[in-house]
């Protein structure tokens, strides 16, 4: 296994409007960096001015810079870093690819209506986001209350867009679907997590201790796998300024 040298810098979207699902997908990238102990720092990118990435011709996030190379798109970044770390390995079987696509095409769409299901849950979610993001005190207050109100209504549109009638039922079904895919294995990757395990865990990690995440663990069988993943991924490799 080869290590990635230097510090990775990740440009990440501030959560607003349609950025929420993108931010959830970006969480899988952070989980990959944590699992492989690649130190990184996060730059929150203003969705209007995008001044933080004015140096780049590519204006969408995430953008990752590592060893002087710019990489874009969460899944593509993970693939490239995986090949750097494991130059003699390939992205393995079709099962792994199938479930990574399931995360991008289904699971993230189920999460948004759940974390913003009610005004209280929207406030809870934005309290977490603003606490863990790079916000001043004033920005934190504005983002928490204005953002929560906006996302409460956006979540209703997302729910309709993705044909979800009952948010919690859809969340529980997704969790059970994943457990069924494990088929008794500790991880989809067998004795250790593969990229699909990291992707599922990555998008669930931000919600685990919110009301929606607590409900998910209480009402489904996913808790044991999630606990194993917490231990496997370990502490965050993020470097805070």
Image (cartoon, rainbow, N blue to C red):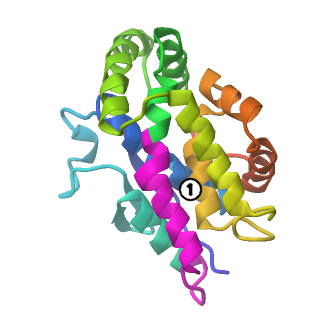
Q: Quadrant of residue 146?
A: top left
Taking the view exactly as shown, the residue that stands out farthest to the bottom is: 88
Local secondary structure at mark 1: helix
Q: How many marks?
A: 1
- Determine crowd level at label 1: few under 14, some 14-19, many 20+ residues with C-alpha closer than 10 A: many
Q: Which residue is mark 1?
A: 199
Inspect this view and state whether residue 38 appears.
no
The x, y position of residue 226, in whole percent, is 74, 46
The x, y position of residue 11, in whole percent, is 37, 47
Q: Is residue 12 magenta?
A: no
Q: Is residue 96 magenta?
A: yes
Residue sitting nearer the eye, 39 or 24: 24
Residue sitting nearer the eye, 115 or 11: 115
In this picture, which residue range is highlighted in magenta?
A: 85-109
Q: Residue at x 40, y 9 (%)?
A: 145
In the rendered view, tell whether residue 94 sits above or below residue 179: below
Q: Residue at x 39, y 40 (%)?
A: 21
**Image quadrant occupied by the N terminus:** bottom right
Q: Residue at x 51, y 62 (%)?
A: 100
Residue 105 placement, left or right of 221: left
In the rendered view, tell whether residue 234 sits above or below residue 152: below
Secondary structure predominantly adopted by residues drawn in magenta: helix
The x, y position of residue 203, in whole percent, is 55, 45
The x, y position of residue 122, in whole percent, is 47, 17
Q: Quadrant of residue 124?
A: top right
Q: Residue at x 76, y 68 (%)?
A: 192
């Amino acid at each position: 296994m080869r290590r990635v040298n230097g510090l990775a810098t990740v440009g990440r979207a501030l959560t607003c409007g349609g950025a929420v699902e993108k931010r959830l997908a970006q969480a899988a990238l952070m989980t990959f960096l944590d699992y492989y102990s690649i130190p990184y720092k996060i730059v929150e990118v203003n969705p209007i001015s995008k001044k933080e990435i004015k140096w780049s011709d590519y204006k969408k996030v995430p953008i990752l810079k590592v060893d002087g190379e710019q990489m874009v798109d969460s899944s593509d970044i993970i693939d490239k870093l995986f090949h750097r770390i494991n130059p003699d390995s390939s992205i393995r079987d079709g099962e792994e690819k199938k479930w990574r696509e399931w995360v991008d095409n289904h699971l993230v769409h189920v999460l948004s209506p759940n974390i913003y299901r009610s005004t209280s849950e929207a406030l809870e979610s934005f309290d977490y986001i603003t606490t863990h993001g790079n916000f001043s005190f004033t920005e934190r207050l504005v983002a928490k209350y204005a953002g929560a109100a906006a996302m409460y209504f956006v979540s209703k549109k997302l729910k309709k867009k993705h044909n979800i009638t009952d948010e919690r039922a859809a969340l529980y079904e997704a969790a059970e679907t994943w457990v069924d895919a494990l088929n008794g294995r500790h991880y989809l990757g067998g004795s250790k997590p593969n990229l699909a395990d990291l992707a599922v865990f990555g998008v669930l990690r931000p919600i685990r201790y919110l009301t929606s995440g607590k409900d998910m663990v209480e009402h489904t069988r996913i808790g044991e796998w999630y606990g194993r993943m917490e231990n496997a991924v370990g502490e965050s490799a993020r470097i805070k300024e």
